[in-house]
Image: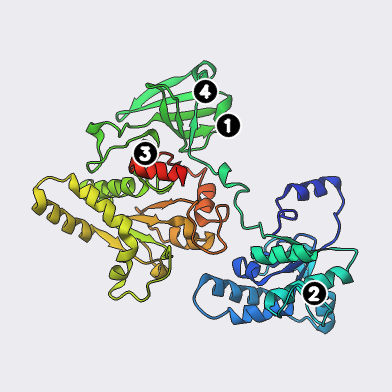
Amino acid sequence: MTRAESSESKAGDKRTRAGKRGPHRIFVLDTNVLMHDPTAIFRFDEHDVYIPMIVLEELDAGKKGLSEAARNVRQVSRFLDELMAGAGKASIDSGLELPSGKYINGQKKQVAGRLFFQTKVLSSGLPDTLPGHGADNAILGQALALQKEHSDSRVTLVSKDINLRIKASIIGVHAEDYYNDKTIEDADLLYTGLQELPPNFWEKHGKNMHSWQEQARTFYRVHGPMVRDWHVNQFLYQQDANGLEALVRKIDGNEATLELVRDYRHERHSIWGINARNREQNFALNLLLDPEIDFVTILGPAGTGKTLLTLAAGLAQTLESNRYSEIIMTRVTIPLGEDIGFLPGTEEEKMEPWMGALMDNLEVLTQSQEGGNWGRAATNDLLRNRIKIRSLNFMRGRTFLNRFLILDEAQNLTAKQMKALVTRSGPGTKVVCLGNIAQIDTPYLTETTSGLTYVVNRFRDWPHAGHITLMRGERSRLADYASEIL
C-alpha cells in the first residue's frame, strides 16, 4: 500500500480523529504489486482499486511454476474468483465490494472501497514521447484515461517498478511505491539489541536494588524510568573499562531483572579456540550459547565475524556438550554475478560452491586444533560428518529435531520464506539467522521489506529470542579501510 494511505499511517489516524473521510482516491495496481503481495487489493481502506486488463494478462502468464511469485499470482486469482462469486456484468461494472483489512478464511469485514476491472476501451492520450505498445505503456495509458474521466478523484498508480513511476511522473500521473509490506519506515531505526547506559544510571536506578547469585551467575533487580524502554534479552553496557555489561532477563512494569554476561574475550572462556574481539561479539556469543534462547538474529557488515562466531558456538554445543545432534547450514542461492550454470552432484555437492564462507571459517576453526596436519585432517572429517549443508528448496514439510540450524545470507529471504523456514524447527532446535541488510540481491526486496528485518522486529519481545548488531569489522586493516572508503 502507498505510504499516504497505509492503514497504519499517520494520515489515516488524522482522518479518523477528524471524523471525516479524505478525498476519494482510485489506485491503479501494477502487476508486480500483486505478485509481491497477493493481499494488496485489500490494503487501501475506503478507496477504490482498479486493475487494467493487461495486468490480468500478465498475471495469467506468471501463474505457472513453483517460485514464490507464481504462488502469489495463483493466490491473487483465488481472491479475485472469491470476490466475483455470483457477480453479474452489472455488478462488475459498478465495482465489487472490497472488505477492509485482510480477506482470509471467508471472513468479510465492513465494506471499504470497490474493485474495478477494465471493462471498456479508454482513450489514453499518451504523448508521442512514449513510443511502443508495451505493458507499462498500457498501464500508464489506463491511469491517464482514468485521471481524465474521474477529474473529481485522485488517481494514483501503485508500482514496485521505479522506472514506471518515473515515466508516470513525467506524463503527469501521480505514482507511488507499495509500502504495506514494510515492517519499519527507516532501516536506520532497526532494533540493534543493545543500549548504552548513561553515566548517572546507578544514581537513578540504584535505589532499592537487589543482587544475588544462582549457579555462578550474578543477577540484579533494578527500578527506574529507563526500564520501560528496554526489551527482554536486550544488552546493556557502560563505556567504562569496568562498566556494566548485562542482559535484560525479565521486565515487569518499572522493574527489570538483569544478568551479568559472561566475558568470552578472556582466553579462559574461549569457544572452540575462538575468543570475542569486541563487546558486540561477546554479546553474540552469550546469545549463541544460551540454552534458553531458541532464535538468534545477528546482523552486521562483512567481516564482523557473524559466521565464525556462530560456527564456533555450534561446534562447541554439538561436539563438546552434545546439546545438539548436528549442525545444519543453508542459504539462499542468489549469485553475485552471472549464473555459471548447472552444478553436478548431490544436494550437498550442489550447495558446496555457495558455502565458501562455511569452508573458510572451518579452516580458521581447525587451525587451532593440535596434532599437526594429521590431526587437522581427522578433525575436518569429523566436522564434515556433523555439519550438513541443505538447500532451501527442499525445506517444505521438514522438521528438525535437536539441530543447530544456521541460515546464512538471510537478508535475501522474503517474510513468507522466513516464516516457512523458522517453522521447520522442532523441539530442541536452535535457529540462527545471519545477514547484512545492506547486501540484498533479491529483486523488489529492500532493507525495510527483507524477511530478516521482519523477524528482528517480530521476535523483539519474545523471551526466547535474541538479536545483536555487530558494528566493528575484524578481518584486516585492508578490509576495514575498504568498507569505509569504497
Can residue 83 be seen by looking at this rendering?
Answer: no
Q: Nearer the viewer, mark 2 or mark 1?
A: 2
Q: Position of residue 62 (x, y in %)?
A: 58, 78
Mark 3 and mark 1: span between their CA atoms?
26 Å
Residue 438 vs residue 358, the one in the foreground: 438
Q: Position of residue 55 (x, y in %)?
A: 69, 76
Q: Are marks 3 and 2 in contact (CB under 8 Å)?
A: no
Please name the residue shown 68% across and 67% down the image: 164
Q: Which residue is mark 4?
A: 198
Q: What SS does tag 2 mark?
A: loop
Mark 4 and mark 1: span between their CA atoms?
15 Å
Q: Are marks 2 and 4 in contact (CB under 8 Å)?
A: no
User: N-terminal of the two: label 4 or label 1?
Assistant: 4
Number of the label disc, if any, that sits on residue 228: 1
Q: Nearer the viewer, mark 2 or mark 4?
A: 2
Q: Which residue is mark 3?
A: 281
Q: Quadrant of residue 421?
A: bottom left
Can residue 433 be seen by looking at this rendering?
Answer: yes
Q: Nearer the viewer, mark 3 or mark 2?
A: 2
Work out whether 178 lies above or below 35.
above
Residue 449 vs residue 14, the one in the foreground: 449
Q: What SS does tag 1 mark?
A: helix
Circle 3 residues within 10 Å: few <14, some 14–19, many ≥20: many
Amino acid carrying label 3: it is Gln
Q: Quadrant of the N terminus?
A: bottom right
Q: Position of residue 147 (x, y in %)?
A: 84, 68
User: N-terminal of the two: label 3 or label 2?
Assistant: 2
Work out whether 279 lies above or below 389.
above
Q: What SS does tag 4 mark?
A: loop
Query: Is residue 114 toward the left or the right of residue 103 in the image?
Result: right
Q: Nearer the viewer, mark 4 or mark 1?
A: 4
Number of the label disc, if any, that sits on residue 319: none
